[in-house]
Amino acid sequence: MYSTVADANTYFDGRLYSTVWSAASTPDKTKAMEQATRIIDRLNFAGEKHAAHLVRFSLTGRNDFEISLTLAQQALVLDAGLTQATEFPRGDDTTVPEDIFLACYEIAIALLDGVNPDEEFNDLGVVSEGYSSVRTTYDRTTVPEHTNAGIPSATAWRYLKPYLRSGHGVKLSRV
């Protein structure tokens, strides 16, 4: 989990419209925080986990990702990344950025409020419905970016988006 329920309680004490959080039991708050962490860690973030970054740095002797590593060295980097339970910290960072904590809190309260990312995805694509002869028309191009990514809160998405890997670039390496 990225943060504790106690830290989330402190955050929500200073936030408007947080009665859903206040009314929830501690076990439900814990479940929401754990699920929020899993939702965050499903995203494709830029860079490497901190543990993998440290191993790569020690293998190359400098902070240069363009150096080719042997297959054995690549396996060491991969194994190091697997030992770090969450996606953050990343790269040179030794701590989790505040934005990730805030995103975790915002996702947790959205989940406690009953927002289901799967249902949101299905419902927001509806452009027309019918009654007689029952018909529903979907347009998946109108689904908001955060809902498409499985994030139940637009506020959380705004905290997370700067840390995501760009899906539009291609990296070429000369071997």
Image: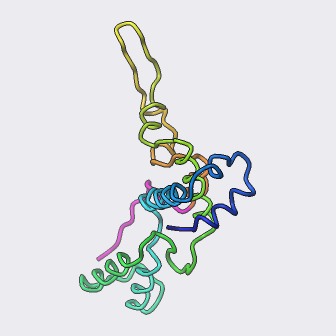
Whether residue 165 appears in magenta in the rendering, the answer is: yes
Left or right placement of residue 146 versus residue 172 in this view: right
At horizontal 36% and vertical 67% (from top left) the residue drawn is 172
From the viewer's side, name the closer residue of 8 and 88. Answer: 8
At horizontal 43% and vertical 60% (from top left) the residue drawn is 38
From the viewer's side, name the closer residue of 114 and 49. Answer: 114
Quadrant holding the C terminus: bottom left
Q: How many marks?
A: 0
| Chief secondary structure of the magenta portion | loop
Residue 147 percent coordinates (x, y): 49, 43
Task: Give the magenta-colored segment's residue range.
Answer: 163-175
| Figure coloring | rainbow
At horizontal 33% and vertical 82% (from top left) the residue drawn is 68
**Residue 93 figure quarter:** bottom right
Left or right placement of residue 148 versus residue 154 in this view: left
Whether residue 92 appears in magenta in the rendering, the answer is: no
From the viewer's side, name the closer residue of 156 and 116. Answer: 116
| Above or below: residue 27 compared with residue 66 | above
Residue 69 percent coordinates (x, y): 31, 83
Residue that extends furthest to the left in the rendered view of this protein: 71
Q: Is residue 165 visible?
A: no
| Above or below: residue 117 compared with residue 7 | above
Residue 80 percent coordinates (x, y): 36, 81
Residue that extends furthest to the top in the rendered view of this protein: 132
At horizontal 38% and vertical 6% (from top left) the residue drawn is 132
Residue 44 percent coordinates (x, y): 43, 60
Q: Is residue 26 visible?
A: yes
